[in-house]
Each structure stands twice: as C-alpha cells, then as structure tokens.
Image (cartoon, rainbow, N blue to C red):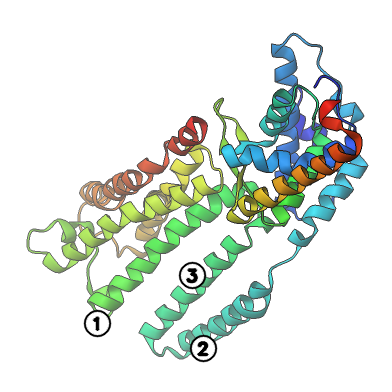
Amino acid sequence: MPDWKKLVERRLTTLNLPPGAKQDVVAELAAHLEDSASADRATNEPESPAIAHIPWCELANAIEHCKGGEGTMNQRTKTFCLPAMAILFALGLILVLRDRAEALQRIIWIACMAMLLCTAASEAKLLNRRTRRFWLPGFVSLTTATVLLFDFDIVCNPFLSFRLISLHPQDLLRWNAASPRSFYVLWLIAQVAFGALGAFFSRRAGGTRATRFVAGAFPAMVIVGTYVGLVPITARISGEVFTSPLAAYLGSAVLVWVAAPAIAVLAGALPFLSDSNIATVQSQ
Amino acid sequence: MSKRIRSKIARGSGELAVLSLLAEQPLYGFEIAKQIGERTGGALRFTLASLYPLLYEMEKRGWLVGYWQPNQAGRDRRYYRLTAAGRGQLAPLRQEWRSFFQALDALAGVSHA
C-alpha cells in the first residue's frame, strides 16, 4: 500500500497555502486516491495510474485560487482581538508587578485566556490538524478548569485569599471540612463539563476516538503529571508540602486530585466518544 | 446515456450535480464523484483534478461546509454538507438548466434525439 499522503505532498510542492490548510488538502486528495485504488482492487480492475495523469501544477494553481484567502488572519483578529489581548496583558502585568487589585488581575487573565482561545478557534485554518484536534481542545478543557478555579475563588471567597482554603487532601477528607469540601465537590462536578468540552471540540475538528478521549481527559492528565512529577520534587526541595506520612498523603492525594477528577472528566467525555453522528449521516 | 458528455458541458453542470447530491446527505469527495458517475451511467464523471477545485470554490462561496469525520471504515474523510445558502442556490440553478434545455430543445430538438 503506497503512502498516498507522501505521494500527493511531493507533487503539490508548489501549493502555497498555510500549513494547516495545505495539510487538509493533501490529506483529502490522498484519501481520494486511496479510495480510488481500493475501489479498483475490489472490482478486479487494474489500478488506474491516476496519479501520473493528474495535472498537478494546474491543480495546485486552481486550489490556491480557491483557497487563496485562507492564508491570512481575519480582520476581526487583526483589528480587535490582538490589540485587545496586548492591552489586557500589559495591564495585567502592571498590576502583578505593583501587587495591586488581585481580583482584577484574575479577571484580566481569564479574559486574556478566553480571547486567546476564541482567536485560536476562529483562526483554526492556520493551525495544523494535530493542534486542531488535540492541543486546542485539550487546552480548552484545561483552561476552563483553571478559569473555574479562579471563578470559584472570586465568587465564593471575594475578600479572602484563595490560599486560605486548604486543598490538602487530608483536609478535604476530614468530616468537619465543610468549606473546602463544598468547593471541591463543585469543582469535581465541573470536571464533567470540562471533559465534555474537550471531547466535543476534538470531535468537531474530526479527532479520532482516541484523540477525543485524550483531549477530554487533558485536565486529569495534567493533574497526574503534576502529582507524579512536580509535587514530590517540590516537597523534597521545600519540605513544606508533606505534613503527614508520605504514603498516606500520596494515597489520599491520588484519590482526591487524580482518580476522582479523572473519572469525572471521562464521564463528561463519554457521550462524545461515540460516532453516533456518522450513523445518522449514513442512515439518511 | 452511455457516452460521456464533453468536458465543458460537464463542468458547467458540476455545481448542480454536487448541490443535488449533497441536498440528500453529506458526502466526501470520492463518494460524490462515485455517485455522480453511477447515477448518470458514466455520462458525467469527475476526476480528482476537476472535482476538488469545484468543491473548494463552492465552499468559498459559502454553499458547502467541509468537516473531517471518520467514514464507515473508520478512516478520516472530509465530508461536505450543504449550507442554507447552498440549498438556496439549488432551485434557481435547476430552473436555469431547465430553461437551457428547453431553449436547446426548441432549437435542435434534443429531447427527440
């Protein structure tokens, strides 16, 4: 079986499109040739040497003509989103450096992050397929998780610092820990939505089942990464994190911050792992 | 309809053929070409070089929307579906072609040929 993508890519070297758009064209034409060869084999016809007879240069020019406008950012991004993000970023930075208006700082970072995601979504044509199908949806689910953490902090606890709510696992598991636990339960419920969001965006961009799964589970993976890598190292260096025996602490940490959120995000991603929409299309 | 229609006529009718097919269900490029070939008894045939520029052009005009989705075999294919604008083009295009055939028929009696 030839590598159709490579064959097409080699013949479309003159096609001048942004990487994402070019990848799409190459993948689409390669899929067509692959289907064509399969159909020829199925009907016992000699495989048509279609690839040799295609006027690749003319085809590249025609495609470029049709998709010419896709190489640049749209007007809204250039005139509004990028300047607004730059202004907000500068403002946020000044507030951080002067250590002022903590709540406003958070709102600014949230707005920056939201605008960045909206811009990335609207400029998806400039992104390559892996970014569209995995990194962007994964980043969306992770960012919404962070935004909600900030939000809960502002809404639930506007005058006190977030750090005053102890999120140590042993505190969350204590029976009388009402405030941290109510925060944690809300956060856990929200994980379902984050998982769904990541998997939904990945499916919309054409992600495979595995990609949708990983994109939905992205926040949980980051938490696992943090616990497995960062927390023990930080604890060893600073000696401040562990207040109870290591094994018990890690056990409860894994339960509270890894296992439970992982189950929640996967539950959210589950409805988007099926290919029910394909069945609908085919049954029409 | 055994003979293939000359390419210039086929190209002109391409938009109508694609819009009519996609009005029934979303399809990907190879399926569009295959179904057009089958349904017209091979009279209309789209090659890779003629089909995709047409699809991209129609997508640019906002008549179609392309999106990636696995097909029945689980392989990623770029499906096209009709937009509201594309659906709106279908009736005028049909009418245009009907008028064209009537005019040609009056002139050359093609319906009796």
Please name which of the two marks, 3 or 1, marks the residue nearer to the observer: 3
* Residue on which disc 2 sits: A94
| Residue A216 point in image, percent of width and height | 42, 48
Mark 2 vs 3, N-terminal side: 2
* Residue in the picture at 70% in, 40% down: B18
* Residue on which disc 3 sits: A114
Instruction: Report the side of A271 relative to B9 (left or right).
Output: left
Q: Are marks 2 and 3 on the same chain?
A: yes
Which residue, as the protein is rendered here, is positioned at the far top?
A44
Q: Gap in Å between the C-alphas at discs 2 and 1? A: 22 Å
Mark 2 Cα shell of 10 Å, populated few (<14), some (14-19), many (≥20): few
Instruction: Please tell me which residue lies in front, B54 or A127.
Output: B54
Q: Chain of mark 3?
A: A
Q: Secondary structure at mark 2?
A: helix
Instruction: Report the side of A221 relative to B56 (left or right).
Output: left
Q: Secondary structure at mark 1?
A: loop
* Residue on which disc 1 sits: A160
Q: Chain of mark 1?
A: A
* Residue in the picture at 23% in, 75% down: A156
Using the image, determine if residue A33 lies above or below residue A210. above
Mark 1 Cα shell of 10 Å, populated few (<14), some (14-19), many (≥20): few
Q: Chain of mark 2?
A: A
Please name which of the two marks, 2 or 3, marks the residue nearer to the observer: 3
Q: Gap in Å between the C-alphas at discs 2 and 3? A: 20 Å
Mark 3 Cα shell of 10 Å, populated few (<14), some (14-19), many (≥20): some
The residue type indicated by label 2 comes to Ile
Q: Secondary structure at mark 3?
A: helix
Q: Gap in Å between the C-alphas at discs 3 and 1? A: 25 Å
Instruction: Report the side of B80 relative to A207 (left or right).
Output: right
Using the image, determine if residue A22 lies above or below residue A165. above
Mark 2 vs 1, N-terminal side: 2
